[in-house]
Amino acid sequence: SSEAPPFAGRLRLAVATDRESLGAAGTLLGADRPRLVEVDGVPIEASPAGHLLFVRNEDVPGVLGKIGTILGRASVNIAGIHLGRSNGGGKAVALINVDTPVPAQTLAEIRALPEILLARALDV
């Protein structure tokens, strides 16, 4: 886009299915430094690379601690955590960089948390 700063250039993607609509925006901070800067209207700054866990959740205390505990029990090491939220107490998103793929059973355990609205393992 040609929008004014904070980004000199931004690419926005919107996808709609019969079940849901999703949107994301990204930019380049340099030739080899892509950044995800928005997910479903929620600002975030994340490096979309490697093994990732994307989470959409209720913005309440303790969610990241629970996710970290579940990942730790599965020996999945967290390399980075990037957070965004719409309003305090509303919806939040997290993009968690991990060193290894998130096992299916671990992902199911995270999805079973009552605060989790969506959890997906991604490989970029």
Image: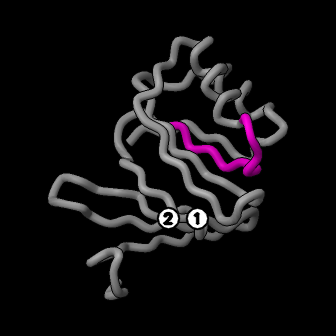
Cα distance between the residues tagged 2 and 1: 5 Å
Would residue 76 be found to the left or right of residue 118 on screen?
Answer: left
> For the residue labelled by badge 2, is the local secondary structure a helix, a strand or a loop?
strand
**What's the residue type where badge 2 is placed?**
Glu
Q: Is residue 55 magenta?
A: yes
Q: Is residue 15 above or below residue 78?
A: below
Residue annotated with mark 2 = 38
**Numbered circle sitting on residue 42:** 1
Q: Amino acid at mark 1?
A: Val
Tell me where the magenta segment starts and ends, as one range.
53-62
**Residue 10 x, y percent position in the rendering:** 35, 74
Decide: marks 2, 1 in contact (CB < 8 A)? yes
Image x and y of residue 101, in percent: 47, 25
10 Å crowding of disc 1: few (<14), some (14-19), many (20+)? some
Residue at x 60% of width, y 40% of height:
120
Please state the horizontal and vertical placement of residue 110, each as a whole percent of the image.
71, 30
120 drawn magenta: no
Give residue 64's position: percent from left, percent from top.
64, 35
Q: Is residue 12 left or right of residue 55?
A: left
Q: Quadrant of the N terminus?
A: bottom left
> In the picture provided, is 40 more to the left or to the right than 25?
right
